[in-house]
Structures are given as C-alpha cells and as structure tokens.
Amino acid sequence: MGRTIYRNKGSKDNIVFSIAGAHGIGKTTIFNLLKKQLRNNPKFKFFPERYVKKPPVPFGSRNKQTAFRSEIHFLQQFIRRNKNIKNFDDKYNGRVLILDRTPLCVLVYSKSLFLKEKDYHLILDTFNSVKWLEDYIIYLTAEPDTILKRTIRRGSLEKIRKQWNETEKNYLLNVLTFYNEILFARKDSEKIIEINTENLAPENVLEKVMNIISEISGYSFNQKLEPPSKQMSLKKFFQ
C-alpha cells in the first residue's frame, strides 16, 4: 500500500478502504450494498474496480499471452482509478473512500496465472512505480467450495465465468494461496482486516464491514441497515 500513515479519530484526512478477496467471494456485492446503504451520505465516496465494462481480453485465461494482456488491462484500470482517487483526495478532506478490489490483486492473479517471469516482473515494476492511495484492506474469505458455489449460482454470467475459468477449483486455490502470501507478508499487514464470510448472510457481512470502517475512521453510523433487494437474491448467493 502506498500510504503508511495511521489515522486517528477526528482526523480531517481522507481514509481509503479497499474491499478485497478472490473472485466469487462477494466483494462487489458488499461494495454495492455499502454504496446503496450510504448513497445519501456525502462523507463517503465509492470507486469501482474498473471503468471498462467489457474487457478487451478474457480474464483468467490459461493462455499466457492472453493472461498477461488481461492483467495489464486491469493494472491500467487501477492506475486510472488511482488518479481519480488522488484528484478527489486533493480537493476534499474528512471523507471515507471505498474501493472495489485492491490494486494488489493484479499481483495475486499474475502469480496465480503463472505468467512468464519477465512478464510478471514488468507488471511488478509498473505496480511499484505507482504511489497507491490505499490505507486499509478489508479481506473477505470463505472455504473454497463455498466460494465456488457462490460463483456457480451467478447464472446470468455463467458463460463468462466459465470463459474466465472462475469455476475451476485449482485456479481458485492458487488465487487464495497467493492472496495469503502477498497480503500477509507485507510489512503493514496489520492494516489488513480479514472477515470470514463462511456462514454469514450478506447483511451480517455488511454490518461487520461498517463496524470496521466506523472503528478505524471514528465515524458513527446512525442509520439502520436496509434489507437487501429481492432481485439480487443475496441470501441464496451467500448460502
């Protein structure tokens, strides 16, 4: 993470949280629920994982060249997002910024796809050249079989999930291994907060995330949690 400043309650500095985890864990779901919950609160600003809805190349490809291009694409998206975060950070203070995914996932997936060494180091060097604005990572976890079930239940994206190999267990296991290796080997690993979502309903995960943000930022939430939309079928998604 680019910044190593610890925040004190009452600080006017912005604070940046990333919601992280393997594909299928439900991080984007929680990101969207949190965004919905706080949509009328100007203290919070939300940044998506990428700005291109349809990626130019498939993610998770077994083809090394395609995999390299997909991770370069994701890295470009994160660099673009980081510039937007910096612009916001320069203009405002006392805000809480929430990110969908951590930029570190580019390193995790590059490792998991076993890119050629020279390609991985190109990504790593580019990653290290950026001063990432990220203070804390909220890392969502669950058992591999649970994550796979959540992934498979996303019927509307079934073809894409298969194309991206997101239903392949060995690939998921590699991702989980490298997340643990890269996240918790960092010198500032105490700024990574892990939430086990194994037997939690989405509103329970959301509540835990909000409690973490409240405790670190010093901001007190006084509104009740809104129930998840029936259209999202979130309880089924998290079972």
Image (cartoon, rainbow, N blue to C red):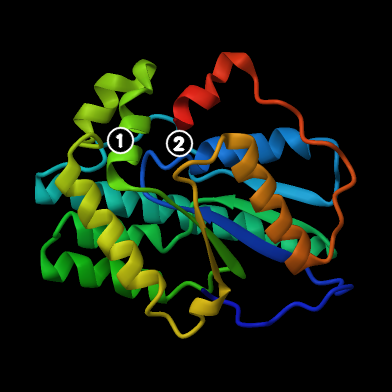
Quarter location, residue 225 = top right
For disc 2, the marked residue is: 52
The residue sitting at 65% across, 19% down in the picture is: 229
Residue 167: x %, y % from top left: 23, 34
Task: Indicate whether 107 appears above or below 98.
Answer: below
The residue sitting at 31% across, 54% down in the picture is: 72
The residue sitting at 51% across, 81% down in the picture is: 188
- Distance from the alpha carbon under mark 2 to that under mark 1: 9 Å
Task: For residue 107, say whether it is visible.
Answer: no
- Outermost residue, front side: 199
Quarter location, residue 95 = bottom right
Amino acid type of the residue that numbered disc 1 sits on in the rendered structure: Pro
* Circle number at residue 56: 1
- 141 or 86, nearer to the observer: 141
The residue sitting at 78% across, 40% down in the picture is: 38
Left/right placement of residue 40 relative to residue 199 reads right
Amino acid type of the residue that numbered disc 2 sits on in the rendered structure: Val
Task: For residue 204, say whether it is visible.
Answer: yes
Task: Indicate whether 225 appears above or below 95.
Answer: above
